[in-house]
Image (cartoon, grey):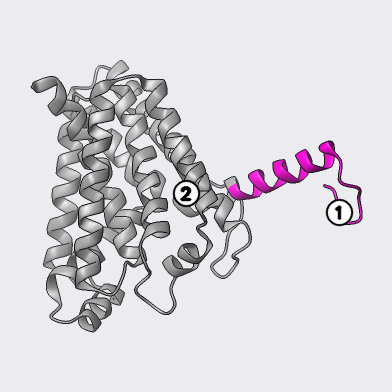
């Protein structure tokens, strides 16, 4: 790896960029999944902007693994409901339930508190309430239903769109707490990070080349934007839990949207 004492040459610049991408990929993959790749610890803010730019590509990795699980289950002559259940299980296990946990906490806080301070306190509580259980159950039910018949491209792209929503929410909305894990990411999101993440998500949609998937993406992104603005009215900004909730809801709506287009 080049050091600061080495001359600036095209080769050294390329090596630096490659090293930064490798570090960012490892951070993004370790943060968003349980895959044993890369190192990341809370408080280490190095390369977080680069890592966030790679979130949609981690989503593609998750989507590919999930799609492969469904393909394998169907190849073993599992019924569509069983294949969907196995696929959803793999999805939750691979991501460590990170965003699902955020969805539950966000639902409890945003729907249960009377004041912004109370809502933030409820979200900080590790216990899960009725609103959180209902929100998680409904999102998982929607995903399970869609996974029985949606296309492989939709399965791969849903986590990509969901991870892009994460970056957009971090970059475009204020953070509600003075400190927090989500705030550390929020502080590192730059226009360059958001632009790179947007290009990645668009590349996936262009590759798929399906009007149904473009429509599904528009539906999920528009809904996520509306929910983010609604959350901002309930608390003074967004939190890491709200980020996770937006990702989960975006994924579910993307899968459903890909089916609704064909039903029209």
Q: Which residue is mark 1?
A: 3
Residue 161 position by quadrant: top left
| Residue at 54% in and 49% down | 192
Q: Magenta span: helix, strand or loop, mainly? A: helix
Q: Who's the residue at 76% across and 46% down the image?
A: 16
Query: Between marks 1 and 2, how big is the CA–CA gap?
Result: 28 Å
Left or right: 5 as drawn, with respect to 119? right
- Sequence order check, earlier mark of 1 and 2: 1
Q: Is residue 234 left or right of residue 10?
A: left
In the foreground, 198 or 180: 198
The magenta region covers 1-24
The one nearer the camera, 40 or 116, is 116
Query: x and y percent of residue 183 in the render?
Result: 44, 69
Circle 1 residues within 10 Å: few <14, some 14–19, many ≥20: few
Q: Which residue is mark 2?
A: 194
Image coords of residue 254 (percent x, y) = 24, 36
Left of 117 or right of it: where is 193?
A: right
Residue 198 location (% of width, % of height):
44, 41
Say whether residue 251 is magenta.
no
- Judge left or right: residue 60 versus residue 19: left
Residue shown at 27% from the left, 49% from the top: 248
Q: Pick whichever, 132 or 217, lies toward us.
A: 217
Q: Is residue 61 above or below residue 71?
A: below
Q: Residues within 10 Å of mark 2 (few under 14, many from 20)?
A: many
């Amino acid at each position: 790896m080049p050091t600061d004492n080495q001359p600036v040459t095209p080769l050294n610049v390329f090596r630096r960029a490659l090293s930064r991408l490798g570090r960012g990929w490892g951070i993004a993959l370790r943060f968003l999944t349980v895959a044993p790749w890369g190192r990341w610890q809370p408080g280490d803010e190095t390369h977080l902007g680069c890592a966030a730019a790679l979130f949609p590509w981690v989503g593609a990795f998750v989507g590919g693994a999930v799609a492969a699980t469904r393909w394998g289950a169907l190849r073993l002559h599992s019924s569509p409901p069983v294949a969907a259940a196995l696929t959803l299980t793999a999805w939750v296990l691979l991501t460590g339930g990170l965003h699902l946990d955020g969805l539950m906490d966000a639902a409890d806080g945003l729907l249960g508190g009377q004041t912004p301070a109370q809502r933030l306190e409820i979200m900080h509580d590790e216990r899960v309430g009725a609103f959180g259980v209902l929100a998680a159950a409904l999102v998982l039910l929607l995903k399970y239903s869609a996974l029985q018949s949606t296309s492989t491209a939709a399965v791969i792209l849903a986590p990509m769109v969901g991870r892009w929503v994460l970056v957009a929410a971090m970059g475009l909305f204020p953070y509600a707490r003075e400190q927090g894990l989500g705030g550390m990411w929020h502080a590192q999101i730059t226009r360059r990070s958001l632009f790179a993440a947007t290009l990645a998500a668009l590349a996936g949609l262009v590759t798929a080349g399906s009007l149904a998937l473009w429509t599904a993406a528009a539906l999920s992104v528009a809904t996520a934007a509306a929910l983010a603005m609604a959350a901002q009215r309930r608390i003074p900004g967004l939190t890491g839990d709200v980020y996770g909730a937006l990702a989960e809801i975006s994924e579910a709506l993307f899968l459903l949207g890909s089916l609704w287009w064909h039903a029209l």
